[in-house]
Amino acid sequence: MAKRNASISVAGLAVPFRVWGQRFAFLGLLALAFALMLMSKAETGALERARTAIVDATAPVLDVMSRPVEAGQAVAQSVESFFVTRAENDRLRQENARLLRWMLMAQQLEVENATLRAQLDFVPEAAPRAITARVVADTGGAFFQSLLINAGARHFVQRGQAVVSHGGVVGRVVEVGDRSARVLLLTDLNSRIPAIVESSGDRVIVTGDNTPWPTLTYLASNSPVSAGDRVLTSGHGGVFPPGLVIGVVAEASEARVTIQPIVPLSRVSDVRVLDYGVNGILPPPEQVPARIAPRPADLAAQPATPADVHPESATAPASPAAGAETTR
């Protein structure tokens, strides 16, 4: 009982001290904050000097520590920029090719539209039949330039048909087999393509000379042809239909005018053989005479048959094959 009374008396004495302690603690914290405010106002220069000294001491360490981080960031940015630039270049290359095709189509449509406006009862040409073939060999040489494709007579390929690739003229078919055909390139020495300069309207002949740059012949001396002008097929001669792109003028001088083919002929891998329904200047093989039959006057002028030759053999009729050959 006595212990209980003692504890109660101690607790009663501690209550006033606790209350006074809480009050003085609040007042102490308030006074400390006020003192710190006064010290910051009074010792501003000293604090600034201390902070400056600390920064000066730690700046070299921070600089050394930050260099590897900056180098890593620079490498990461370079790698990211490389891939971004590569993707952007691929996208721009595809967009440039697409815009170039659109520009060529727009220029061709503009010329065609102007021509159609000048005509009233215009009948549009029928769409050509196209045969896609793959280039299987380059049969060119020092004196001729041609390609061998894997499409022939059984695929309805005929001599004189136009051959294009990626919207530009490659050449024409000159030999046809059952499963293959030979294409004479427009750069060959024997190639002649009637053409027209789109900007000036001058009619020319694109002449191959076994070089990568065919020349324009029969061009007027006062023609305003300049580098970059497009050259199209004119449709004259019946070999190529009008409007096919051959190339652009690469060099225009008084001595000669050369063009750059629109199709890189050295890298052609696939072509399209177009059938516009034109026969061209190359007749079918069965219409080419293998031998000219002698005239009766020439036979009468021949010397007499020698004595050791029997008249029956001299006057014997020609074999059916020979007769068929001479009458073709």
Image: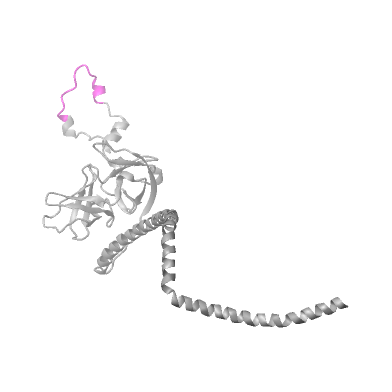
Front-most of residues 150 and 73: 73
Q: Is residue 67 magenta?
A: no
* Occupied quadrant, residue 290: top left
Front-most of residues 124 and 3: 3
Front-most of residues 283 and 152: 152
Front-most of residues 180 and 246: 246
* Occupied quadrant, residue 178: top left
What residue is at 32 percent from the left and 41 percent from the top?
Answer: 147
Residue occupying the far top of the picture: 308
Relative image position of residue 259 (x, y in whole percent): 22, 51
When the figure is inspected, residue 137 is found, relative to residue 196, above or below; the finding is above
When the figure is inspected, residue 296 is found, relative to residue 38, above or below; the finding is above
Query: Quick check: 65 left or right of 163?
Result: right
Q: Quadrant of the N terminus?
A: bottom right
Relative image position of residue 298 (x, y in whole percent): 16, 32
Colour scheme employed for the rendering of this structure: one colour
What residue is at 22 percent from the left and 43 percent from the top?
Answer: 211
When the figure is inspected, residue 28 is found, relative to residue 189, above or below; the finding is below
**Residue 206 in sight in this render:** yes
**Residue 172 in sight in this render:** no
* Occupied quadrant, residue 104: bottom left
From which residue to which does the magenta span run?
300-315
Relative image position of residue 17 (x, y in whole percent): 70, 81
Magenta region's main secondary structure? loop
What residue is at 48 percent from the left and 79 percent from the top?
Answer: 38
Relative image position of residue 252 (x, y in whole percent): 16, 53
Q: Quadrant of the C terminus?
A: top left
